[in-house]
Amino acid sequence: MESGHETSTGVYYEIALLRSAAPYLTYRYRSDLEPGQPVKVPVKGTLKEAVVLRSVGEPEFETQSITEVLPYCYRPWQMETARFIAEYYFSSFGESIGLFLPFLQNQEVDNRNNPPENLSIEELPQLSPAQKQAYEALNKEQNALLFGVTGAGKTELYIHRMAEKLAEGKSCILLMPEIALTPQMEKRLKRYFGERVALWHSRLRKKKKEEILEGIYEGRIRIVAGARSALFVPLEDLGLIIVDEEHDDSYKAMTRPRYHARDLAVYLGQKIGAQVWLASATPSVTSYVRFPVIRLKEPYIQTEKTYRFVGGDTLNAPILKALEENYRWGEQSLVFVPTRANFKYLWCENCGRTHQCPYCSVGMSLHRRRRHLRCHHCNYTEPIRESCAECGHTPLKSDRIGTEEAMEIIERAIPGIRIEQFDKDAITTPGKLEKALKRIESGESDVIVGTQMLSKGHDYPNITLSVITGLDYLLGLGDYRARERAVALLHQIAGRSGRSKDAKILIQSAQAETFAPWLDDYEPFLKEESEFRRLGNYPPFAHLARVLIARKEEDTAAAKTAELAERLKCYEGIEIVGYGPAPLERIAGKYRYTVLLRAARRTDLLRALHAVAERGVEIDMDPVEFS
């Protein structure tokens, strides 16, 4: 950096506070600093971490001095990517650069002393002819979608490619949609790569993060696996990014910056020259349309699955009979239900009102075992109530079976059966997850009852019966992706069984005709759904954005929404699909309104939204949640 702005009191710099929406601030320092230099600065009596953006002339106002220059640096590509995130996902630069972990000063020089590592082919898992063919096809592409059925051996391909990249002196990142997936993957990767592998996620303790970063800085750790945040670790010479279960909505951040880790992985790969593999047994329509598709059509171990549709809306006699028979045969079963707790709602059959959270416009979930009602949005809890808060009628009724209710029904019907609860109420830490998986693997659990956590790629080798409920609920959501989500979930849950033995799949649905055509192969569904999206002008053939306005007063929220809609009508190339109260109209005491926009070109959408963006207006580009 040319000093140019140096004065008798030092050089003046514009800085951005990390992980903050605050405006840029100006500080001085006694000597030259480069853009991307992390520092500490005093802000209202406390020290805050910040990053230097540029040198500036001496301002007319009083300035404070930068307190400390940290021994790190943000690389130019990190700074450029952060600017892209801030611009595209409507966050501040401080929030977007705060996603990244900086490199150690001179880290690049230090890592040159670490020679490339080579694992002999004999040490790696053997590939079948189909896997070899897919592997060769993948390696010809810079970005590609590995579309492999559950149990086809996608992880073996990851391991081979990682070994090749290590041999080239490169490093690798493996993204998984949730922390819950990490224990099994860690075990598999460390079998081949040992201490070169580290797991990274938001729940790691500070000391553990520091140990991992030290290993990365020293070049000992070359493979990082984990959830969204693993994309931002400071690996030198990144050569491969794999996005496992790429269809999963968990890759989309629901708070600012509202980035999508899958899309950002592709962007980063292009910027730094890394190869990017997206992989899934049920790929998203968007990825299926946008990227070269490499298929793995057959599971590594051939087993037979038989499907049967059953009626009803609870765990009824046919389902319980199938579970009991499987239990008597000494086999393990899996039961998927769409929600946690006992029921989604308590409601009054006299006045029709749902018992709602006083701060959110949602029904409160019944947790009978914990003896309370809880709002799953703001976590407000209260004792279980018997009478209606509106009219006093007793008793309240309940709808939509949840995990705890399912467990109670099974325990009453099949005495002695051992049940593993698999949802966010029971699996609250990686340690609890690991213990649950060990119980399942050792046969200490006879049946697993859980929510969508069951679909997240865990390997349950001994499941021979899967029961899938709640698909009709997913089909009824107000979301253009409702059909995709329901059919994909069916395939994901069905794929958890029959990994080593023949299996039966019971599907509880009144809409068998919606699911029956796609049971044997997901690709025909993707082709039909792609045509539906194209004709309906939905992503990936158009671009969506959602504007969210939240205010304490409902009238203020409504007026602001109407004003924004009128301003947006003035811009060419964008369509206001609709605006008004959000499906969840009130959360944590604030009334929420939305405007949904569509455009054929991203640039039109971004131009209009940047023109109306202001404090208190949240903008979600490429939203995945509408209900």
Image (cartoon, grey):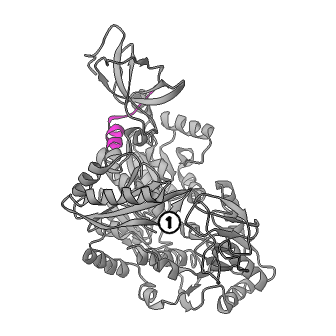
Quadrant where the N terminus sits is: top left
State the image coordinates of residue 116 (x, y, percent, origin top left): 42, 41
Rendering coords of residue 3 (x, y %): 28, 17
Front in this rendered view, residue 1 or 118:
1
Q: Residue at x 56, y 69 (%)?
A: 452
**Figure check: 253 above or below 465:** above
The residue at 44%/44% (across/down) is 232
Q: Is residue 79 magenta?
A: yes
Q: Position of residue 46 (x, y in %)?
A: 54, 26
Disc 1 marks a residue whose amino acid type is Leu
Residue 119 visible in the snapshot: no
- Within-10-Å neighbours for mark 1: few <14, some 14–19, many 20+: some
Is residue 308 shown above or below 376? below
Instruction: Give the extent of the magenta segment.
Output: 71-83
> In the rendered structure, does residue 49 fall within the stretch colored magenta?
no
SS at circle 1: strand
